[in-house]
Image: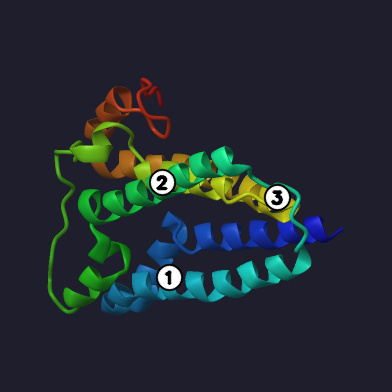
């Protein structure tokens, strides 16, 4: 029963997290907030963290029984994957993406300025983005499964992995709408999540 509770809570969090950043809801917020929409991204990040921290703590309280242990050499391999995933995640975050925009800081810095945003004809393909289109999501999946010790970890990781994959496809649709044929070509050249495989997303 407690694992069903965990599934319900994490699925609800993922659904809310996705809805708050969906095209329909953000368009509504833009209409309602007008120029103050510049603060929405920061609000979105803060509310996500505010809900995530107690959810992690509560999940840990529901299940404290460790069912998976790692021997010496498997644990070394696990740690290599963990550190590699963290390195990939933060490298992509700081060097391949606009971290200020992610946190909403750039939007706040531009508050009150009239700025017309036009999509670029070029897609950044340097670094990790030349290997896979979503390196941060790939790194997050690796990190999650390398931290598996309890049944609740398996349950949560399954929910989050499904959410990441679905969320990636939804984000792909947004990017195609934003960049058009340029991004469609990028999809054919670079794989979505699994590196060194040919990406074929329609």
Residue 112 — which label?
Answer: none
Q: Residue furthest front?
A: 72
Name the quarter where the N terminus is drawn: bottom right
Task: List x then y, in percent, for residue 175.
Answer: 32, 43
User: Circle 3 is placed at which residue position?
Assistant: 155
User: Circle 1 is placed at which residue position?
Assistant: 44
Between marks 1 and 2 in the image, the one whose residue lies nearer the viewer: 2
Between marks 3 and 2 in the image, the one whose residue lies nearer the viewer: 2
Sort mark 3 into few (<14), some (14-19) or many (20+) by Cα contacts within 10 Å.
some
Q: Residue at 42%, 55% (x, y): give it.
A: 23
**Callout 3 secondary element:** helix
Q: CA distance from mark 1 to mark 2?
A: 25 Å
Between marks 3 and 1 in the image, the one whose residue lies nearer the viewer: 3
Q: CA distance from mark 3 to mark 1?
A: 25 Å
Name the quarter where the C terminus is drawn: top left
**Callout 2 secondary element:** helix
Task: List x then y, in percent, for residue 174.
Answer: 37, 45
Q: Residue at 14%, 38% (x, y): give it.
A: 122
**Callout 1 secondary element:** helix
Would you say 183 lies left or right of 27 here?
left
Sequence-earlier tag: 3 or 2? 2
Q: Is residue 137 visible?
A: no
Sequence-earlier tag: 1 or 2? 1
Q: Quadrant of residue 125?
A: top left
Q: Is residue 10 visible?
A: yes
User: Circle 2 is placed at which residue position?
Assistant: 85
Front-most of 199 and 71?
A: 71
Would you say 185 lies left or right of 56 here?
left
Sort mark 2 into few (<14), some (14-19) or many (20+) by Cα contacts within 10 Å.
many
Sequence-earlier tag: 3 or 1? 1
Task: List x then y, in percent, for residue 31.
Answer: 36, 71
């Amino acid at each position: 029963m407690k694992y069903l509770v965990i599934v319900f809570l994490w699925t609800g969090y993922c659904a809310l997290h996705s809805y708050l950043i969906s095209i329909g809801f953000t368009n509504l917020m833009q209409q309602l907030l007008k120029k103050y929409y510049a603060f929405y991204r920061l609000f979105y990040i803060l509310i996500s963290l505010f809900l995530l921290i107690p959810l992690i703590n509560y999940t840990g309280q529901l299940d404290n029984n460790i069912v998976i242990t790692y021997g010496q050499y498997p644990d070394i391999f696990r740690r290599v994957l963990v550190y590699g995933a963290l390195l990939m995640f933060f490298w992509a975050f700081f060097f391949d993406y606009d971290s200020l925009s992610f946190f909403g800081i750039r939007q706040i810095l531009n508050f009150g300025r009239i700025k017309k945003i036009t999509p670029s004809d070029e897609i950044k393909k340097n670094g990790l983005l030349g290997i896979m289109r979503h390196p941060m999501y790939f790194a997050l999946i690796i990190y999650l499964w390398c931290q598996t010790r309890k049944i609740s970890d398996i349950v949560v990781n399954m929910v989050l992995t499904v959410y990441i994959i679905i969320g990636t496809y939804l984000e792909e649709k947004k990017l195609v709408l934003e960049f058009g044929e340029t991004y469609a070509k990028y999809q054919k050249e670079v794989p979505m999540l699994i590196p060194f495989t040919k990406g074929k997303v329609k």
